[in-house]
Structure formats: C-alpha cells, structure tokens
C-alpha cells in the first residue's frame, strides 16, 4: 500500500466535506448556544433542555436518517447525466420528508406524558414540557430542509446548505438573547425563549436554501416547477427501501445516546446536566465525521454510477484515513482540556448555585475522558456507514448497528451506569463499547462488498 495513493485525495475530500461539516456543526451549534445561554439560568433549566432534546434527537434521527436516501440516488444520476431520475429522486424525497416531518411532530407532541413516567426529576420535567411543544413543531421545517440539503449534497453543491445553516444560527442567537433574557422590551421567557429561537431559525433556514438553489444554474431546474402530488410509485418505493433502513441506523445510534440522557436522569439533575455538556461537546466533533460521511456517500455514489470499483475503494479508504487522523486530534484536545471545557456551560459567579455547578463540571470533565477515547470509533463507524450508503447497501448495516448499540452497548451502560457501580462514567463506557463494535463490523462489511465488486467487475 502506497500511502500517497490515499493522501492525495485529502484535499478534494476536505473541499467536499468542509461545507457539510460547517452545516452540520451549525445544527449542533444551535444546541451549543441554547445550552450555554440556558445554563446561565441554572442546572435544572439545563437538564430540562437536555430532557426535552432527548425526545427531539430520536425524532431528528429518523428524519435526517431517512433523508440520506436522496443523496446517493442524486449523486448516481448526476454522474450519469440523468436529469430526469435526479429530479424524480429529489421531488419524491421532498414529498416523503414533508410527510415524515409532520408525523414526527405529532409523535413528539403526543409523547410528552411519557416524561412523567420516566422517573426524571419533577422540576426538570415541568420545565421541559413547554419547551418541547415549540421545539417539536420545528421538526417540520428541519426535515424539509434535510430534503433540500441531501439533494444539494448529491449534486456536490455542499456549500449552500452550509450558508443556510449559518444564517439560521445567527437568527437563533439573536432571538435567544432577546427572548431568554427579555432584552430590548421583549418578554423574558427563559427556556421557552430558546425554543422560539430554534423554531424561527429553522423556518428561515428552509426559505434561504430554496432561494439559493432556485437561483443557481445547476440546481434551478430541479427545485422549480415541482408537481408535488404527481407521484411515481417505483421511485417512492426506492426511496422508502433505502431511507427506512438508513433512518433505523441513525435511530439506533441516537437512541443509545438518548438512553444515556435518561439513565443519567435517574442519577439526578446534576449528572443529567453534566451528561448534556459532554454530549454536546462530543456532538460537535462528530459533525466533522458526519461531513466526511457525506463526502464518502457522494464520492462512492459517483464511482458506483461509473462502475469504477477500484477507484471507489481507494477513494473511500482515503476518507476513512482522514477521518481517523482528525478523530485522534479531537481525542487529544478533549483529554488535554477535559477540566476546562465544561466550565463554558455554567456560571461560576452564581453563588446560589455554586455547589451544583461545581458538581456538574466535575462529572462532565470525567465524561470527556471517555469521549476522548471513543472519538476514533465514532468517526470510523459513521464514515464507513456513509460509504455503504453510497453503495446503496443499507439492510445489513442496519442489523449491525442494532447489535452494536442495543445488544452490546446498552446493557453495559445500564449495568455500569448504576450509582453503586461507576455512575455517569459507566454509562459512557457502554457508549464506547457500542461505537467500537459498530466501527469494526461496518468496516468488515465494506471490505467484503468492495472486494466482491472488484472481483466480479
């Protein structure tokens, strides 16, 4: 193996992935800003946002996971200069994402009573419910945006979703400031103000990306003159068959992190707030890997359209290598600064809550050590998953993710996460076990499939 065969792809891979990373980081940055601003109100408020978002993460995973079916179909059509199939994939994807967004909103809205049955701190539940009402409604524009984003990524126009997300972040920060703290004559709404900021910013995001794509020569014909209700059963079935397993893959992973939020809630509001801090910081580095995952999906989809399987394998491995190098760098940063990063989230000048804040930082700093270790596993599994989606291989990876997270990871989190064992740190050891298993098994699957394609080509 000549290393330069792979490293020479780094520049192009980065160019394709960087806008996706920034766009995905933008989604996470919304939570980061919400957490920092809400954290100034107290640990109960921070835990409430964590609990409310735990429901949102599950719904978002289904919406975002399903929408990824659009990208490989558009990328394959783009490589083959097949406009008709490319537009059909986008239109039907947009239709299905709209239906799914509305369904997910209703699901979260009517699932709120479950909060009282989950043995979470009661003050946290009562704060979380009004927050959840508004944030649940924002699922509709979010999943619609995902359809536009995945289409845009499939055409290798990865910058435009990034621009939309950056604009949305600015809108979110402004409305958070005005409505959480009641500035410039606006009402002081606390964490409900953060929910309004998220809702408004997501509608702005959809409007902005549609305007951008409708003005660009390459995408204009795709996103205008859409006959929304003239549907082709074959394309609907193709998207459902690709999208449903993809949604389940993301659901299985996000659900175990959500389970970590609920398990930490059983330990009390401070462990739950600490878990939210560590999860939010890990999410930001994960979005870098997600960007590379989309690059893998697009480039593998392109090479599949060209039936060039040797190049497909070489390009995919170059992306895996880049993801691993970046993950090691992030892991080192987490390890070196694990005592300092959690302090960004709490107010040390708040004398009333000083004891709570100190405990939250102490727990979160320990969790960041576990997060430092699983950076590599987390990055590798999501990037290999992207390559497998580019190959339109979704069923076996779905089984792999289920086994990794729920047969292996969750039982470890549950048993080691009890207060009398390792507490919060034990929960994260289970996450580490699940991610590592997924990374190994998914790579074995990719290796098997690509070698088989090369031999039979």
Image (cartoon, grey):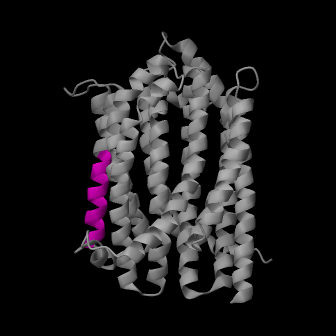
Q: Which quadrant of the figure has residue 446? A: bottom right
**208 vs 435, nearest the viewer:** 435
Image location of residue 3, percent across then percent down? 76, 74
The residue that appears at 75% across and 20% down in the rendered structure is: 420
- The extreme right residue here reads 1
Q: Which quadrant of the figure has residue 317? A: bottom right
| 78 sits left or right of 414 in the view | left
**344 vs 30, nearest the viewer:** 30
| 229 sits left or right of 246 in the view | left
Q: Can residue 169 be seen in this view?
A: no
Image location of residue 122, percent across then percent down? 47, 18
Image location of residue 207, percent across then percent down? 26, 57
Q: Which quadrant of the figure has residue 245? A: bottom right
Q: Does the magenta stretch include residue 202?
A: yes
Q: Can residue 330 be seen in this view?
A: yes
Q: Give the range drawn in magenta.
A: 201-215
| 369 sits left or right of 33 in the view | right
């Amino acid at each position: 193996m000549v290393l330069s065969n792979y490293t020479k792809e780094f520049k192009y891979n980065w160019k394709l992935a960087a806008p996706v990373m920034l766009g995905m980081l933008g989604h996470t940055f919304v939570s980061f800003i919400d957490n920092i601003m809400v954290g100034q109100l107290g640990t109960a408020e921070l835990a409430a946002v964590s609990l409310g978002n735990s429901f949102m993460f599950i719904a978002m995973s289904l919406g975002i996971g399903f929408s990824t079916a659009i990208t490989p179909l558009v990328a394959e059509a783009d490589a083959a200069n097949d406009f008709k199939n490319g537009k059909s994939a986008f239109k039907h994807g947009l239709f299905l994402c709209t239906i799914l967004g509305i369904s997910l909103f209703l699901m979260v809205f009517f699932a709120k009573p479950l909060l009282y049955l989950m043995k979470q701190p009661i003050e946290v539940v009562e704060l979380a419910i009004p927050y959840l009402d508004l944030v649940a409604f924002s699922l509709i524009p979010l999943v619609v945006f995902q359809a536009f984003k995945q289409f845009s990524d499939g055409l290798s126009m990865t910058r435009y979703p990034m621009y939309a997300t950056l604009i949305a972040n600015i809108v979110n920060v402004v409305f958070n400031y005005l409505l959480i703290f009641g500035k410039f004559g606006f009402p002081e709404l606390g964490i409900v103000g953060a929910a309004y900021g998220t809702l408004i910013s997501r509608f702005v995001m959809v409007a902005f990306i549609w305007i951008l794509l409708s003005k660009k020569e390459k995408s204009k014909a795709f996103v205008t003159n859409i006959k929304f209700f003239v549907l082709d059963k074959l394309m609907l079935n193709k998207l459902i068959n690709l999208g449903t397993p993809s949604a389940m893959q993301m659901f299985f992973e996000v659900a175990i992190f959500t389970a970590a939020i609920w398990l930490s809630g059983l330990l009390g509001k401070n462990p739950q707030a600490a878990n939210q801090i560590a999860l939010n910081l890990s999410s930001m580095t994960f979005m870098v890997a997600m960007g590379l995952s989309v690059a893998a999906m697009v480039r593998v989809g392109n090479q599949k359209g060209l039936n060039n399987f040797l190049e497909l394998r070489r390009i995919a491995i170059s992306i895996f290598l880049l993801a691993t190098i970046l993950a090691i760098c992030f892991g080192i940063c987490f390890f070196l600064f694990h005592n300092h990063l959690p302090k960004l989230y709490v107010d040390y000048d708040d004398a009333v809550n000083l004891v709570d804040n100190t405990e939250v930082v102490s727990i979160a700093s320990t969790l960041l050590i576990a997060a430092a270790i699983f950076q590599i596993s987390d990055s590798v599994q999501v990037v290999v998953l992207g390559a497998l989606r580019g190959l339109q291989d979704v069923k076996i990876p779905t089984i792999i993710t289920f086994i990794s997270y729920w047969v292996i990871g969750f039982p470890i989190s549950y048993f080691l996460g009890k207060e009398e064992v390792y507490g919060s740190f034990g929960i994260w050891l289970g996450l580490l076990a699940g991610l590592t298993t997924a990374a190994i098994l998914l790579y074995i699957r990719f290796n098997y499939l690509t070698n088989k394609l090369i031999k039979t080509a």
